[in-house]
Every structure is written in structure tokens, then in C-alpha cells.
Image: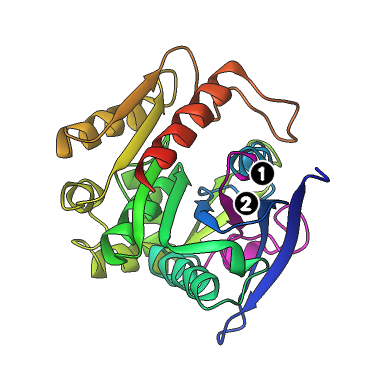
Amino acid sequence: MSHLFVSPFEIRLGDGGIIRGEVRAAKKPGDRPALFLAHGFKGFKDWAFMPYAAEKLAEAGFVAITFNFSRNGVGEQDFDELSKFGYNTYTREQADLAEVLKAAIGGNLPHAGLIQRAKLGMIGHSRGGGNALIFAAEHPLIRAAATWNGIARANLFDDAFEAKAREEGVAYVTNSRTRQEMPVRREFFEDLDANKDRFDIPARLAGLRIPVLMIQGSDDAPRLVEGFHRLQEAAPHQPAIELEGTGHTFGAVHPFAGTTEALEQALNATIDFFKANL
């Protein structure tokens, strides 16, 4: 990766949170469009294909910005801040995205001088896809967006889980990879209550006047495949790709063990989309 800049950054928030990230860019002259990559519910900036995807985007001529949401439960290593994870909400994640955008256009990220501030795009995986659409709907500086297996429903949980969290103050979801019990607090659902219209993802997508690319694996969880079709119905004019025979991670695993055909298809389609629209 000697052909790329890979430079870390930290944004320290007034509430004690920290957004940790990296900026990747090819070592060549000239400014270029920038892409922000938002991870999902149990994801983080170093999860599985995220660093690889950022590298490929940087090689393709973009500044690629990856980061951890400040309440994603990851400090220095894999989910070592689960107490913070329990207090994460969409409102918090939207505020984090605003801080990263502010740092980028304000010249406070590494290699910010390479960023064409009129050509900014956003990519989100899973829950990050929903966040990307909400954020783009509220920030006109984002000129194009893409979702990878993105959600259509902000509430990720079933009725029993939600009832337990509301009644007891917290409920736990098992991380099948780490076997950790990850807390989701009552505040998550209260945030949804207070922001029903704001976090109505199909409605926010329908109102967007920028290009949006949606990519979905056909073998993903049924609720996500169904959600993909809901998003298509909400914005039938937007490009959508259903990749046959692949699931939520495009066949990639964590720790990353190499790329897959489906991941390359998703990346190539994404690169072509942003080259055409930024």
C-alpha cells in the first residue's frame, strides 16, 4: 500500500466520545472527490472488507474516509467499549457523520487539501446504508450516495426484544462472531419514537434528488431483501443491483481473508457509479 496515503485521525467530541478513522488517497497530484464509508450495526472501520474497499476506492481516484461511530463499542480493539455501544442511537450516529463532514470540508482531516469539496459522496453498509440515506437527505453537500445491503427499516429488532429493552432498560443481542452480549438500551427506541419521520428511510430516499445506487445480495436475510425491494419501490428511478448468490457481507469474512467475486462486483459498480455522478 506504499502507493497510498493511509493516515489516521481522531475527532474528540464535547460529550467525551471519540471518532477514530483513516483517510486513504493515492499518492498523486491533484484534488479529487471524497467518499465517506459508514459501517453497520455490529461493524467498525477495520471490519472485514472495509479497509480493502477503502483501498480500492482510493486507487480508483477518490479520497476514501473510514471511521468508527463514537458509540460503536470499539475503542482500540474489537468491541472493548460495550458500555458505550449500549447508548448508541441514530441521532448520535447522524451527529457523528456531521462531525466527520465538518472536519473534511474544514481542512481538519489528513490530506484534506486533496478533497474536492463540491464532490462528496457517501457509502453505507447495512445500518450504515440507512444512515447514509438519512444524512444525504439533510446535507446537500452530499452529491451522491450508495448503499450496500442497506436497511429500509430503522428498527432492527423484533417486538419481544424491543419490549424487553423498554421494560427493563436494556436488552442484549449476541454477537455470533465474538460471543459477546451487546447491550441495546431503552434510549435507542426512545430516539426512534422521537424521530419517526426523520428516520423513515424509504421516505427519505424518495425525497432525495441526488443519484443513489442500491446494491443487495440475494441471499441476505429475508427482511433485508424485502427492505431492498421497498427501497426500489420508494425510488424506482434510482439504480439498483441485486447480486445473485451472495449474502450480507458479499461472501467476505472477518478477519478479512481476501476478496470475493461478489465483493468485486459491488465495488466495481460503486466505482463506476461515483465516477459518473461526482
Residue 8 percent coordinates (x, y): 73, 64
- The quadrant in which the N terminus is found is top right
Residue 205 percent coordinates (x, y): 23, 48
Q: Residue furthest bottom?
A: 14
Q: Local crowd at mark 1 within 10 Å, few (<14), some, or many (≥20)?
A: some
Q: Residue at x 30, y 28 (%)?
A: 240
CA distance for labels 2 and 1 = 5 Å
Return the residue at label 2.
Answer: 44
Residue 160 percent coordinates (x, y): 36, 46
Does residue 146 appear to the left or right of 17 in the view shown? left
Q: Is residue 131 magenta?
A: no
Q: Residue furthest front?
A: 29
Three-letter code, disc 1: Trp
Residue 78 percent coordinates (x, y): 74, 52
Does residue 224 appear to the left or right of 3 in the view shown? left
- Residue 183, by quadrant, is bottom right
Q: Residue at x 25, y 50 (%)?
A: 210
The reply to whether the C-beta atoms of the residues labelled 2 and 1 are less than 8 Å apart is yes
Secondary structure, mark 1, is loop
- Up the image or down, 37 lies above or below 170; here it is above
Secondary structure, mark 2, is loop
Three-letter code, disc 2: Phe
Return the residue at label 1.
Answer: 47
Does residue 70 appear to the left or right of 241 in the view shown? right
Q: Which residues are magenta?
A: 58-87
Q: Would you say residue 200 is visible in this rendering?
A: yes
Q: Residue furthest right?
A: 2
Main SS category, magenta section = loop
